[in-house]
């Protein structure tokens, strides 16, 4: 299925790997941090509304 | 305003003021270069203008974190900010004092260090000229960086990270003048650009520095 | 010049700390600020000095009238007493430091470096600095820290002399200085927290 | 609705609560469309476009390189605009959006630089050349780093927002200056930005055109990157808003509210 990339196969594939990898890391990091902040905010809001 | 300038100069020259630190650093960096790249005089004379410019730039950078930090710590800046003197003038004077105590000595020392690096004879004039025009911009830009990081405990490294990219245009044109001067090429275009950048930063950047300082004093 | 503050609210780090604060400070009077630590006395002084903007309310009669000093003196240890004072005198455009030297009994120390002074002497020099600014309203933040009883007394005398000459002072301190003036307890003006579930630009 | 009223309505999203509610609603759309566009564009580009007669299969790298480079610059522009909005109108969301965008800009710049280096190795015979365009991106990268470092270093959030905004303004001017300086300093061997010229699309200018075969998948990739950028900025701004609220609540707990 992979098309014949000729002698530049390494370059092309590594470009795609690096770019997609970086994008995935960025999205994953954003989502993990986003989830954590969402959780923390709920926790502290609950705690504070309980304590007044 | 004169009083502020005189006080800053006095403080720099008296014990503990750190005057000469930049100069010593400039000397040491220049002396280290041949150890790193080898003693061939042809190579040294090729890289001399760039090395001297970079050395001057780093020496300038070294003294930036003291530029405002001392006045910040002892509360002088609070009182200066409430004084009839506009903060824009204060930062301009501070930059001028920094240039007189750091930039100008570097300019004067550069030709002697040029000898160490085998700088070609026509290069001396343009090296001094480019540094003379370029170092004021480095002081003014540095004052902006110092104002940005003045409230921070360990702002030194951050200050370098913020200021170095801002030094790029000055370094490029300044070193270009020195390089072209050393090879007896036409220097007018980069010289004009360098002078333009210096003039523009001196005219405009103090407003940004003062604004930033006001924010930090809140 | 009377300092008039009406309905002032101030913030620290974006969070309201004091609100609805009103008072007057007429010439010749002192106002002692009281209140627990962290309530915002320093923030109040800085706001009045114009170093930070108030959230709400008005401050009248403060423009170019205030000399502000935090705990630090703004003194340069490598300059002499005279040089330190001369500098501030010329920055504030006032003439002469002789009166300040006389008032604070600094004549004998005039040529000493500020770094060689004792804590009490330094404090006197710091107050002399306030005097050479020529500004009538002094704002002092915990000025008696690190002073012994004698030095505190000298400090109180100095402030009294300043008041006698028509100046005024706003002092955040816990010590009774025996000055002619009122005590302002800012405790009741502590900002009331808003309900936390309706947050806006302030995130509260 | 008149334009003025529309503009006014836009400012309502500067309220953090409103922003959170709205972004939550529209985010799935942006996530899905961006993913779809990037997948379609990359698959089309990777599997169904021919090799370039000169560059061989390395031409496939442009589907990543060009969109990333575009977003690296546009991200800084967006930060510049939001910084200005913060300085002029004091809308917290605006400052936080700038903060949220910066790491995206860093990643985009890294992708542009890395794919450029990987492409340059077979084409120019070197991983790195001090070509003006590459150098400018490297400088842009340094600006991003400084900007993020300043945000991280300052305790007080409003002070941090103010200082980083001023840095962004001043930095923009110096970034443009650096661009000219670098151009002057080295004339370079990089291709012109052929995608953006109308002539390149119509094929009128045969010298440096990106032909239509490459252009459509590239366009889809660019759209995908733009949508991904929007999704990330919206999502990350929401995170920053929450982080900011947590900080404010904790500060209040400390003073004993």
Image (cartoon, grey):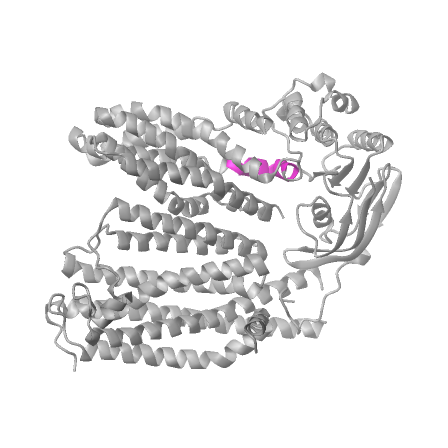
Towards the viewer: D20 or D50: D50
- Tell me which secondary structure the magenta stretch mostly adopts: helix
Instruction: Identify whether A37 is placed above or below C85.
Output: below
**Residue B170 within the magenta-colored segment of the rendering:** no
In this rendering, the count of numbered labels is 0
Q: Which residues are magenta?
A: B67-80
Say whether residue B102 is left or right of residue B188. right
Q: Position of residue B71 (x, y in %)?
A: 58, 36
Towards the viewer: D111 or D63: D63
Residue B143, visible in the rendered structure? no
The residue located at (41%, 47%) in the rendering is B161
Indicate the quadrant where residue A1 lies. Answer: bottom left
Indicate the quadrant where residue C141 lies. Answer: top right
**Residue B79 within the magenta-colored segment of the rendering:** yes
Towards the viewer: B170 or D114: B170
Residue A38, visible in the rendered structure? yes
Indicate the quadrant where residue B189 lies. Answer: top left
Q: Position of residue D190 (x, y in %)?
A: 21, 57
Q: Position of residue D81 (x, y in %)?
A: 48, 61
The residue located at (58%, 47%) in the rendering is B216
The residue located at (24%, 71%) in the rendering is D201
Towards the viewer: B174 or D249: B174
Say whether residue C41 is left or right of residue C2. left
Q: Position of residue D29 (x, y in %)?
A: 43, 81
Instruction: Identify whether D186 is placed above or below D63.
Output: above
Instruction: Identify whether D76 is placed above or below D5.
Output: above
The residue located at (78%, 47%) in the rendering is C60
Image quarter of the N terminus of chain B: top right
């Amino acid at each position: 299925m992979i098309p014949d990339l000729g002698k530049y196969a390494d370059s092309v594939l590594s470009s795609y790997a690096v770019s997609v990898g970086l994008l995935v890391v960025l999205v994953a990091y954003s989502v993990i941090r986003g989830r954590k902040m969402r959780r923390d905010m709920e926790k502290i809001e609950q705690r504070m509304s309980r304590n007044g | 305003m004169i009083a502020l300038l005189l006080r800053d100069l006095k403080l720099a020259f008296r014990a503990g003021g750190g005057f000469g630190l930049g100069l010593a650093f400039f000397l040491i960096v220049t002396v280290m270069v041949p150890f790193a790249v080898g003693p061939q005089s042809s190579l040294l004379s090729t890289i001399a203008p760039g090395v001297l410019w970079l050395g001057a730039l780093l020496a300038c950078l070294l003294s930036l974190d003291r530029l405002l930090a001392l006045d910040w710590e002892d509360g002088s800046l609070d009182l200066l900010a409430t004084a009839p003197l506009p903060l824009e003038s204060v930062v301009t004077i501070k930059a001028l004092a920094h240039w007189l105590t750091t930039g100008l000595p570097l300019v004067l020392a550069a030709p002697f260090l040029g000898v160490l690096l085998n700088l070609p004879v026509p290069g001396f004039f343009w090296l001094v000229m480019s540094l003379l025009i370029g170092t004021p911009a480095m002081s003014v830009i540095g004052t902006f960086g110092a104002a940005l990081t003045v409230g921070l405990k360990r702002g030194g490294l951050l200050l370098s990270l913020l200021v170095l990219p801002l030094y790029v245009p000055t370094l490029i044109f300044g070193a270009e003048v020195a390089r072209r001067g050393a090879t007896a090429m036409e220097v007018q275009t980069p010289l004009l650009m360098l002078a333009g950048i210096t003039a523009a930063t001196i005219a405009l950047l103090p407003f940004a520095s003062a604004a930033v300082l006001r924010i930090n004093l809140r | 010049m009377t300092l008039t503050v009406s309905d002032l609210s101030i913030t620290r780090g974006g969070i309201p700390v004091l609100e609805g604060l009103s008072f007057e400070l007429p010439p010749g009077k002192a106002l002692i600020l009281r209140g627990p630590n962290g309530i915002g006395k320093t923030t109040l002084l800085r706001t009045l000095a114009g170093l930070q903007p108030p959230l709400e309310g008005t401050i009248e009669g403060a423009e170019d009238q205030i000399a502000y000093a935090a705990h630090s003196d703004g003194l340069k240890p490598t300059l002499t007493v005279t040089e330190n004072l001369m500098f501030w005198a010329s920055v504030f455009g006032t003439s002469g430091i002789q009166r300040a030297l006389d008032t604070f009994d600094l004549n004998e120390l005039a040529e000493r470096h500020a770094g060689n002074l004792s804590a009490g002497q330094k404090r006197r020099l710091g107050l002399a600095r306030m005097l050479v600014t020529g500004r009538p309203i002094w704002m002092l933040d915990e000025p008696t820290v690190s002073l012994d009883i004698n030095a505190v007394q000298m400090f109180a005398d100095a402030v009294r002399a300043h008041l006698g000459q028509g100046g005024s002072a706003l002092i955040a301190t816990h010590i009774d200085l025996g000055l002619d003036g009122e005590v302002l307890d800012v405790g009741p003006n502590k900002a009331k927290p808003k309900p936390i579930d309706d947050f806006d630009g302030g995130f509260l | 609705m008149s334009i003025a009223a529309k503009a006014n309505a836009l400012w309502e999203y500067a309220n953090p609560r409103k922003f959170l509610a709205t972004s939550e609603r529209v985010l799935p759309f942006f996530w899905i469309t961006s993913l779809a566009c990037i997948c379609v564009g990359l698959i089309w580009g990777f599997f169904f476009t021919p090799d370039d007669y000169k560059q061989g299969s390395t031409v496939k790298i442009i589907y990543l390189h060009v969109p990333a480079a575009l977003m690296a610059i546009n991200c800084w522009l967006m930060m510049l605009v939001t910084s200005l909005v913060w300085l002029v109108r004091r809308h917290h969301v605006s400052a936080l959006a700038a903060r949220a965008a910066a790491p995206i800009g860093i990643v985009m710049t890294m992708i542009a630089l890395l794919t450029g280096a990987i492409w340059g190795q077979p084409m120019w015979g070197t991983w790195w050349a001090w070509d003006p365009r590459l150098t400018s991106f490297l400088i842009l990268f340094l600006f991003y780093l400084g900007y993020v470092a300043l945000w991280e270093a300052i305790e007080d959030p409003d002070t941090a927002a103010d200082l980083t905004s001023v840095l962004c303004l001043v930095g923009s001017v110096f970034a443009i200056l650096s661009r000219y300086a670098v151009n002057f300093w080295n004339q370079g061997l990089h291709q012109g930005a052929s995608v953006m010229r109308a002539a390149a699309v119509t094929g009128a200018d045969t010298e440096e055109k990106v032909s239509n075969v490459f252009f459509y998948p590239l366009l889809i990739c660019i759209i995908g990157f733009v949508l991904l950028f929007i999704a990330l900025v919206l999502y990350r701004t929401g995170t920053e808003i929450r982080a900011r609220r947590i900080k404010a609540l904790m500060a209040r707990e400390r003073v004993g509210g």
